[in-house]
Image (cartoon, rainbow, N blue to C red):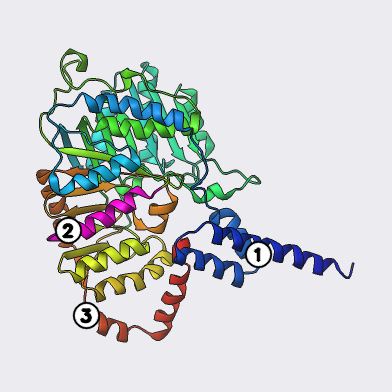
Amino acid sequence: MIYVHWLILLVYGLAVVGAMVRVLMDNRQPAKTMAWMLVLTFLPLLGIILYFFFGQNTRKERLISQQSLDQLTKRSMLEFVEQKDLVVPDNYKTLVQLFATQNWALPFKDNQTDIFTNGYDFFGALLHDISQARHHIHLDTYIFDDDALGHLIADALISQAHRGVEVRVIYDDVGCWNVKGSFFERLRDAGIEVHAFMPVKFPAFTSKVNYRNHRKLCVIDGRVGYIGGMNIATRYIKGRQGQGWRDTHLRIRGNAVYGIQKAFLVDWYFVDRTLISNRKYYPAHEGEESGGQLPMVGNNSLVQIVTSSPIAQWPSIMQGYVRILLGAKDYVYIESPYFIPTEPVLFAMRTAALAGVDVRLMIPLHTDAKLVEWASRSYVMETVEAGVKVYLYQPCFNHSKLLVCDDTLCTCGSTNVDFRSFENNFEANAFFYDRDMALRMKQVFVDDMARCVQLSDVANLEHRRPFVHRLWESLVRMVAPLL
């Protein structure tokens, strides 16, 4: 028995060394590799547990067959081919090609978009469109809360299911950990097909707890699509001071809905292993087939629905952000609730600012996660030193995720400017190549900026902050890539 503890230490040591070798062989970004090395070295036992749950790389795993993905993509491609007079702006042809090549995100013209900046307007429109559904409703959300709003949406879905409308719901298992199973069972009992994304059950915990579906999508009859940052929760309509979380969500009708539909159906195949590619889920937007409800939108508002995930070969949305920042001529405005940028994004932001581009970053004055707030401060200071103008949103927590560039391009979706969104989560953004849409999104940023305080005079700020605070922020930054 005297040697038992030595045997345990030997086994533990071999496990740690094995984990370190695997981290090295994954060839991740050096910052992330070093962060895991530090965790495994200086957090005995806890470090190996954290690595098992959160550190294993799934990018090379085949979680959806390429053949099925090809079939889902070909259906949206058929709709893409039918477009007439498609014109891609010369200055964004490389970006459009990047997304089309890496993500099969096809550009669609003829779109009309509504921008929602508060929960009252968004949920009102969503409930109205749900009530108008005649064939199907596809809902994909990170959080579907068991609260008053969640029950209101659930009741609307149940009502439509009773009328014979096909209703499919995907919710993230980790995002809905606090939601009782009975909430979703009520939906299933009404005939709604409901699936949790990558369910994590004790004791079968695996590293998939780290890879979550953060998308917020809804498609109604294949003609109306929603994409953005709002989950289904009352926090978006009511806060402690009577003001809910600030967020941005979009309602799109037109050809780009095909892209949102494809994103949902890929996720549906992932959770249900049912391949849905029938033409009826990609209906025409004009003539008799549309039932006269949604006449054709005729314009050149070009949209790409871009997704990213930890199993994709390349981090498409992150690459898009880098390409936009390095190609900007006049300005880039960014809103993000969390700011823990990957090195390529941080480098692109500093490079653009140093080159004279007006780079502005808006983040909340206080976030809903204190550790993330501490970790982000050193990154924020680094951008300010390079000339980035940083604005701190004061009235409430700003959960909005958007970017607008040079009055010609903008994007909005579920992607935060942090490691988790760029590398670990399943995300979705709409990219618009349209001056009118870019100007409208710019106005959203300007309106939010009026409610901000600007972070400036970084040298004085650094000296005024206590040394202990600055030391703690630097320590937390070491593990920031893991947050």
Name the residue beneath numbered marker 2.
328
Magenta residues?
Answer: 314-333
Q: Position of residue 131 (x, y in %)?
A: 28, 25
In the depicted structure, whether residue 221 falls above or below residue 41: above
- Residue 11: quarter of image: bottom right
Kind of residue at disc 1: Val
> Between marks 2 and 1, how big is the CA–CA gap?
44 Å
How far apart in space, not on screen, are marks 3 and 2 (Cα)? 25 Å
Foreground of the two, 356 or 156: 356
* Image quadrant containing the N terminus: bottom right
Query: Between residues 153 and 333, which one lies in front from this camera angle?
Result: 333
Label 1 Cα neighbours within 10 Å, binned few <14 / some 14-19 / many ≥20: some
Verify whether residue 319 appears in magenta: yes
Which numbered circle lies on residue 17? 1
Q: Is residue 258 magenta?
A: no
Q: Residue at coordinates 55% horizontally, 58% vertically from top-left?
A: 25
Residue drawn at x 26%, y 68% is 350
Residue corresponding to mark 3 = 457
x 32%, y 49%: residue: 317
Instruction: Say which element carries label 1.
Output: helix
Amino acid type at mark 2: Ala
Instruction: State the image quarter where residue 331 is shown.
Output: bottom left
Q: Residues within 10 Å of mark 3 (few under 14, many from 20)?
A: few
- N-terminal-most mark, 3 or 2: 2
